[in-house]
Structure formats: C-alpha cells, structure tokens
Image (cartoon, helix red, strand yellow):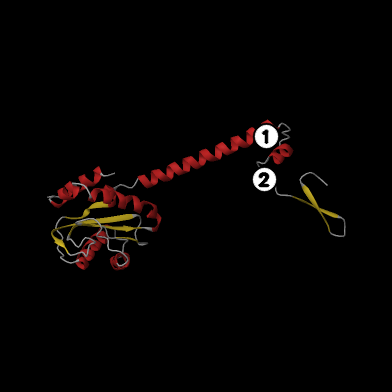
C-alpha cells in the first residue's frame, strides 16, 4: 500500500484511495516537501501559525477601527437637534424626534421606526439617568446609526425609573449591520449624561453648541 493511502477490499482486489492530509502536519511536510528533518518541519509549522495569528490580529484591529470610527458627532446630525421640544408628552416626543430622523434620513420610514422604538421601550423604560432618556431600537430601515436630540425646557413626564421629569432625550435608530456599535454609543451617551454637559446643553442657544459638546465625548 502506498504512503498516504488506504486500501478497501471490494472482492475485485484492493481499491486505493488517498487519505485527506492536514496540509501543515509533520507527516505531510515530510512526504510533500521531503523534510526529513523534524526541526525544519516544526519551524515551518510555527511560521505558518505565526502568519495566521498576525492576520487575525490585523483583521481584529480593522474591526476595532470600524467600531471606533463612529463618533457621537456623526450619529447626531445638526439638523436633528431640537433645542425646544414642542410636545409635552412622551408619545409626542417620540413622534417629534422620529419625524426629525426620517427627515434627515429619507430611507427611514417613520411609522415602522416608531413601532420598533415603542416595542423596545415597552420592555424597559429608557429613562435610566436622572433628567435624561435614551430611547433606541435596532431598525433595519436605516443605513447605519441615526440619532436625534430633543431638549425640553419644562420637562417631560417620561415614566423614568426615578419618577423625575426628563429634560434631554437622545433617540437612536441602529441598523442591523451597526449592532456592534450601539453599546459603545450608548455607553458614551451614558457617560455624557452624568457630566456637566447636560446642564450646558439645556442652556444651549444654538445647535452648534450641542454639536461641540458631542465632539468632546469620543
């Protein structure tokens, strides 16, 4: 029987077939490349493994660069920042901000996005920081991540966890392909919401001030 083959008795003699090789196993290297020296074979295997690990590291680095590449200032278009919300109710605020997002992102259907936002909101109230809320949803009708910011001077009865009025609302619609980014974005917003930035945003006279604050939290 030949090296690297096995025989099966079929009654008509021995039928030979070749076993599948592990391309970088030592037996394969010995037979294919005639590397009779164990050390040389082992070094070649290690070199291959190092190459693979380097490729994996490069891929992971590029993936992290993609994740880190989405900034708060890019998520919230200046046109989707409302300094004086007209609505006084949670339902009205949702409609107002969703309409703003769909105006900036015409591929987004306001009605279906609103339905997705309420489905998420009904699972757990997103008013988790005093005076601030983060309604968000995974929504297939958006290209990446889109957001809107609404500021109320009088406060909204949001049903927040601390039962206090909400003054600043960050709304997010996140596409399926951007799911890896949404926790990072929410974490940045959570950090921002616990800083003095909220007080500055509430007093902002123009949207440029809000955009400048967002650019600092990257």
Mark 1 element type: helix
Looking at the image, which is closer to me, 42 or 114?
42
The residue drawn where x is 55% and y is 37% is 51
Residue 61 in the image: state x and y as whole percent.
43, 41
Seen in the picture, residue 93 relative to 78 is either above or below; the reply is below
In the image, 23: left or right of 155? right
User: Which residue appears at 63% of the width and 37% of the height?
Assistant: 45
Q: Which residue in the rendered view is the most extreme toward the right? A: 12
- Give the x, y percent position of residue 126: 27, 60
Q: Residues within 10 Å of mark 2 (few under 14, many from 20)?
A: few
Horizontal side of residue 11 vs 57, given as left or right: right
- Depth order, front residue of 211/117: 117
Question: Do callouts 1 and 2 mark residues in contact (Cβ within 8 Å)?
Answer: no
Quarter-wise, where is residue 88 in the image? bottom left
**Residue nearer the viewer, 38 or 52:** 38
Position of 61 with respect to 196 (left or right) is right
Q: Name the residue under label 1.
A: 41
Locate residue 189, reporting x and y percent: 27, 51
Mark 1 to mark 2 CA distance (whole Å): 13 Å
For the image shown, how many numbered marks are present on the structure? 2
Residue 143 locus on image (x, y percent): 35, 56
Residue matched to label 2? 22
Give the left or right position of residue 120, taking residue 85 as reference: right
- What SS does tag 2 mark? loop
Q: Which quadrant does the C terminus fall into?
A: top left
């Amino acid at each position: 029987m030949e090296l690297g083959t096995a025989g099966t008795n079929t009654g008509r003699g021995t039928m030979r077939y070749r076993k599948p090789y592990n391309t970088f196993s030592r037996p394969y290297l010995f037979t294919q490349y005639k590397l009779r020296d164990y050390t040389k074979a082992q070094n070649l295997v290690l070199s291959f493994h190092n190459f693979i690990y380097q490729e994996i590291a490069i891929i992971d680095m590029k993936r992290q660069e993609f994740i880190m590449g989405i900034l708060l200032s890019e998520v919230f278009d200046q046109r989707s920042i409302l300094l004086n919300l007209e609505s006084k109710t949670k339902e009205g605020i949702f409609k107002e901000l969703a309409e703003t997002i769909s105006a900036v992102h015409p591929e987004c259907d306001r009605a279906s996005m609103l339905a997705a936002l309420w489905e998420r909101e009904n699972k757990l109230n997103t008013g988790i920081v005093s005076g601030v809320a983060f309604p968000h949803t995974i929504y297939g009708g958006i290209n990446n991540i889109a957001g809107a910011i609404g500021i109320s001077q009088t406060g909204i009865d949001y049903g927040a966890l601390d039962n206090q009025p909400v003054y600043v609302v960050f709304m997010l619609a996140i596409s399926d392909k951007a799911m890896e980014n949404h926790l990072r974005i929410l974490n940045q917003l959570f950090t921002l919401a616990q800083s003095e930035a909220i007080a500055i945003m509430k007093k902002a006279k123009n949207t440029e001030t809000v955009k400048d604050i967002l650019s600092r939290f990257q």
